[in-house]
Structures are given as C-alpha cells and as structure tokens.
Image (spheres, helix red, strand yellow):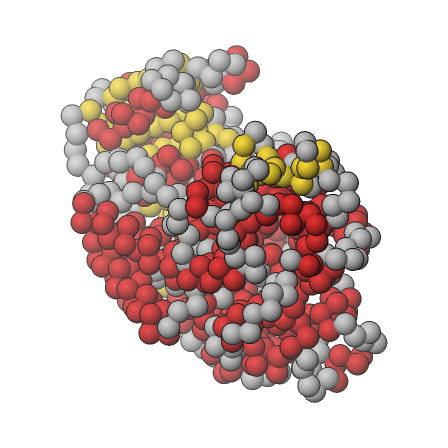
Amino acid sequence: MRKFGLIFSLFLTGCVSFDISGKWAAENALKGNYKIDYTQHHPYEIQELCTNLLKVQNFKGFDYCISQLEKHHVVDGRLVNKLARDTAYMSEDYTTALIYGLKAEAALNRGQAKLVPLFLSKALIGVNGNPGMLVNGEVYKNDRYYPASVSIRTLGVGAVYEGVYGSKDKAHDYLKQLQNLDISGLASSSLEPEKRAWLTKIFISIKKYELAYNEITQEKSVGDKLKHEAILKLNPAYYLVSAATGWSYDDQEVWSKIEADAMLCHTLYKLEAESASVCYESFLQSPIIDIYGALKFTALKELGNIQLAQGAEDKALASLSEAVELLEEQRSSLSLDTSKLGFVTDKQSVYRDIVDIYVRKNRPDRAIEYAERGKARALVDLLASRETLSPSNNSSELQTLIASLDEAETRFSSANISKDTQRAATRGLLRKYKDQMNSQAPEFTSLRVVTSPSITQLQDQLAKDEGLLEYFGTEDDLWVFILSKQGVSAAKLPQTHLKSLVTNMRHDLQNPSSNAFEKSSKDLYKGLITPIEDNIAAFKRITIVPHGSLHYVPFSALYNGDSYLIDKFELRVLPSASVLPFLSNSSEETAQSMLLLGNPDLNNADMDLPGAEIEALAIAKMNPDSKVLLRKNASEHLVKTNAGGYRYIHIASHGVFDPDDPMSSSLLLSEGGGDDGLLSVAELFDLRLNADLVTLSACETGLGDITAGDDVIGFTRGFLYAGAESIISSLWKVSDAATNTLMQTFYKALPSQGKSKALRNAQLALKDGSYSHPYYWAAFQLTGQYD
C-alpha cells in the first residue's frame, strides 16, 4: 500500500478483499482466462486484467475485458468502485484517459494505424483535463500517481505512433512531454520502469538507437563501443516491461523481460553491433519464445539478415524459412506486428530475401513458390478483417469447421504460458482444420490461410503454346519467372526506379495528341521484356502476373520501337498464379444471356455518363436476350439480387478507390432496396455469380491498392471469387466514342472468337484505325479464362 499512498487507500475504502499486487490479473491473462463475472471483481483488478491481456497479445480477450469494464464499472463517464461501502469515483477525465489510452495502445499493438489517432485524441482530452480520484465530489489536489499513470501510456503511444507512422516532429513533442513528466516521490517505484519502457520504444521509433540502448542498460555508451561488445547485458532490461511487483516465480520473471530483451537485440541490430547475432541466438532460446510470435518472427528475420551479411547463406535460409512458417501459421499477420515496440517489421521482405537466395541457387521452382506465398500472405492479411467472409459451399459441416479453426487460431496467436504439449496439440489442430477446409473449399481456404499450389499443378493449367510471366519484388529488386509446360526459369531483372517509370508511362499515355509515351514505354519494355525476349518468342499466349506498381502497367502497350506486345501475343492478367486452379469454364447457359447496367443515377448531374447509356443500348441490340438497366434501375440492389442469373454482365459506371481501405473501393450504382449504391470490393466476396464474363466499362475499374505485399485487391479479384470466369476492366477512363467502338467490336466477335482473341482483335482494330494512340485501346485488359 505504501507506494500508492493516501490516494490509493481512499480508492479502496470499504471494498471487499482483492488482489492489489496484480498477480491475479497476470495469471489469468497468461492462462487466457477472461470469461469471468466482471461484476464480482474490483475495477482495479479488471483494469489490470485488460492491461495484461494486451501485453500477452490476447486481443480478443482485451476487447471483451475493456467492454466489460465500461459496461459494469463506468457510470456517467466515471470509473466506479461498486464494491465499496461508500462508492468512490474516478474523475471523468481519468476514466477517459484510461480506457481510450488502452484502446489506442491496443490499436498500436495490432498495427491498426488508422484507429490509433481516433482513440488517442480522446485519451489526450482526459490527460489534459483533470484526471484523478474524486474526494467529496472534487479531484484530490495532491494526487500525482493517477494523472501520471495515464499520461505515461498516452504520451508513449502518441510518440511511438508518430515515430512509426506519422510526423517525427510530433513524436519529439510527445517525447519531450514524457521526459518532463514528474514521477518522483511515492509513485516512482511503480511508474519509472513503465516510463523508461516507453522512452526506449520512442527512441527506437525515431531511430535514435544509441539513446534506446542507453535507456535499456542505463549506461552511457560512446561511439563504436557497441560494435565490439562481446557480452550482452540482457537482464538489466527486464524491468522495462512491467512494474515491480515482488513476484518471484520463474514464469513471471521470464515473461516480464522478454519484450525488453527483444528491444535490446533489435537496437544492437540497428547499431550493427557485432553482438547482435549472439543476442538473437540467446533470445531465441527463451523457454516462452514460441508464444510471442511477433518477437520470434522479428528475431528470425533479423538474425537471417545478419547471417546473409556474413555470407552464411544456408544458415540465413534456415532462419528466414522458419520465419515464413511462423508467419503463415496464423490467419492474420497483425498478431506479429511489432509497432508496439517502436518499429514495423516488413514481413514481405522475408519472402523477397528467400526468393533472392533460391534464384542465386538456381532453384526457380522454390523461388516462384515463395513469390506466390508472399502474394498469398498479402491477400490473406487484407481479408483477415472480413469475419463474415463465407464459402460458396456454405454447409453446416464447413461452418462448424470454420468456427473450430477460429477458436484454435485465437488460442494459438495469444501468448499463453501453458505446457509445450498443449501448444503442440493446438498447432496440430490448426493444421488438421486447415487441411480439412482446403479439401472441402479450396478457393475459400486460399483467402483465409496461405496456400500455394505446386509447380506441376500450375503447369497443368497452361496450354502448350502458352507462357506465364510472374513478376515479384520491389522497384529496385525485381525478379521474373517464366513458367510453361516445358519448365520454369527465373531471372533477376536490371530494372531500377520502377515506380517512377510506371508513373511516367501512365502520364504519357493520358495525352493522345503526343508520342511521348514511346520513350517511357520503351524504357519499361527494355527492363521488363527485353531480358527474356528469347525465352517467350515461341508462345502465342502470355499470362502476366504483375506485382506492385506493375499492376498499373498496360502490358499490351509495351513498345520495342517497332511493335507493341499485343502485336505478338494474346494477353491476359492474373492477380497471382495461384488462382489458375480455380479458373474453369463452368458457367451454364441461362434464360437471359446478358445483363447490362449503364449510366446509373447517382443524384449528381456531374456524375452522369450518357456515353455509357448509349454503349449499353448499342450492345443490347446485338444481343436480343439482354436485359438493360439504366439510371435508377441500374442499382446495387438489382445487381445483388439478379446478377446470378446471367452469363454475361456488363457494367458501365464510375469506380472509386480507397487506398487506405481497398476493400471499401466501390462501383457507383443507383441506391435503393436498402442498399446505398456503393457495390464495394468487400461485398463482391459475398456475391454468388454464374457469369462467363463480367465487363467493367468504367473509370479505372482495374486498379486497386498497392498493399504491403504489393498485390492488388481490386474488383477483378472480387468478381473472380464471386464466380465470374473472366473480367474485362480498364486501367484508366477512355473516351466514350473509343470505348463504344471497342465494346461493339468485341461483343460482335465474342461468340466466334472467344474472349481473349476477340478483345485483342478489337484493340488492334482501334490501333490500326482512327484510334491509333494506346490511350484509346490499351486500357482494357482481360483477367481470368482466355476463352
């Protein structure tokens, strides 16, 4: 009681006995026990339970705990001790700072960058108000502990968030406030370790690694001293993670120091200290390292990078491969986020490093496997928040299996000190459930967990005269894989500054009165095609699997100075090679063959598309079995309720894109029937179609966001999952006249030529006619089946 003084004594007045040490909260958090009767526990215990659930990454438990704290122990915005004889209240500002500070920290720990400032702004209102205990209706003036306790967390979260995601100047402002926060006196023994922990994280977030090292070890290191350290001082760091409690049992000591050890190793790694590898090798021997996935993943990744730099390629491959296995065990890699420690680990770089190693080892089969796994990881992460994502085969048996998998994933991703045999059993259940789900619903499984078909499976999907070009990497480290019936090869491309070249080409293409595109297009051709030109010369059809900014490239318009790529090949684009096994000509003939939507009424005359209406009506004349929906009738509701009955679906409307939330990107249709008119990418994954072809004749409907894995989630991926065999979409807004001409030519030839050949011939007709500039014909691309 002494360290909390009079204030804490007042808060406890008249209450039933409870655990002041925090041991009850820590033990229950470590065991994953959060489904308790929250009405029978003191709010301090609940507060500590929520805090500890957050520490052990049990985010589901934390969400439940904080909601119960708000439900049962907050009245009129104030934290209430309902168990006291004379009910005591914490001030509204304290309650706000506590609850929203914890929520902001949880969002930071989860890597939910968009949510942090929303919670943080509310927490700051509380911190800057009058946080503390109410005595006789007034905040106790001599209270220093409670204001300091909520201020440390709020300022720490604010600084780390700005350091990792935002403004370094703002990070320094938060840092200065935290450094100046007075915690001397009775509260210092409890609050000083927490303050220093946040200071360490802040220094890491703003890349002041020597200051972070000093804070951890309480030493004043100078210059190159760190580069020659032979002995690590891990133990001085343990008090950074949790306040001193007097606990002596081994599990708690190991648990309380592991994050601090991780910060020390990461700091040494960033300082290029020779002792960094020894630090990580020691750290990975921790008896509880397996339950801290984020820390183990980062340790393996950075140790692998050290080993690569040392020339120990086989050791590096082993470390990085183990990191990938850890990454792919869980549905969402957010559970492996390290932003709470002041830095963000680039999870995709692990795949790039492994791809590079296998290419240099002349193992293209393994290299393309990891490239596909990297893209699959990016896709699964984007869809991980879609709790309602459902399979097309939505049987009760499959639903039970999904629920079992969810429960096992929650247990596995939460830090829970349990017997090794129990954790091994959970890992075994995860593998069993995933295998069963993959057997019952393979395409659905590919959206929930990382899966990658074998090279043989992919080759079986290719014709003899067809090649697949898969690109993978960043703008300065780019690889290409060439897959065909004959085999697979790989090459590291010399292309650099890729993103700027793509930007230049797209800019030049938007001016049809200029030939400036020829240079930028030739530059890309030289970097992307010329090094492999001989390898693809024999193909008639080429499947392009782009990556990153290459998703924005119209490959048909790549120019070698004499001809375009479309002059030589039929082309299609796929979001990844792994979708090949899910493509099949399974659509059935239906009573009405085509559904056309054009010029939806968006309640804004500036958004009208009269050319789209003309286009829809012209195409309908060519298909007597068509149904045309215009203006108010071109609604989201009718698409959702009727589109499943058509073989061909043609939508001529606007598209909008949300780079921060690509699943919210939408086609703009008319509202009505309970729908808002925004047919989002997320909603496409709940549609059930039977379409041979979906044509999106709209504004930039082929684009999606470049994600952490640089893999696009756009309308094409959503429509493929919904059941469309093929999609034609556009990379930019093309003039109405050219689009109308191209579409009519395409649909006229479609029955006899098939999709790929009909689109290519329609594009060539424009190119060789009055619309020769690629602005008019190169925007449209086919995704999915060729025929």
Residue at x 17%, y 36% (from the top left corner): 588
Quadrant occupied by the N terminus: bottom right
Q: Nearer the viewer, residue 587 or 666?
A: 666
Q: Is residue 127 left or right of residue 511?
A: right
Say if residue 134 shows up in the picture. yes
- The answer to whether residue 370 is above or below residue 528 is below
Could you say where residue 386 lies in the image, as x and y percent from the top left? Answer: 39, 43
Q: Choose top left, top right, bottom left or bottom right for residue 185.
A: bottom right
- The answer to whether residue 412 is above or below residue 708 is below
Could you say where residue 557 lies in the image, as x and y percent from the top left? Answer: 51, 45
Tell how many labels: 0
- The answer to whether residue 342 is above or below residue 694 is below
Q: Is residue 755 left or right of residue 237?
A: left
Could you say where residue 675 lies in the image, as x and y percent from the top left? Answer: 38, 22
Say if residue 571 shows up in the picture. no
Quadrant occupied by the C terminus: top left
Residue at x 36%, y 19% (from the top left corner): 674
- The answer to whether residue 294 is above or below residue 685 is below
Q: Is residue 368 left or right of residue 758?
A: right
Q: Residue at the far bottom: name it.
A: 230
Residue at x 39%, y 66% (from the top left corner): 369
Q: Nearer the viewer, residue 555 or 317?
A: 317
Could you say where residue 592 lies in the image, as x and y percent from the top left? Answer: 20, 24
Residue at x 60%, y 38% (from the top left corner): 88
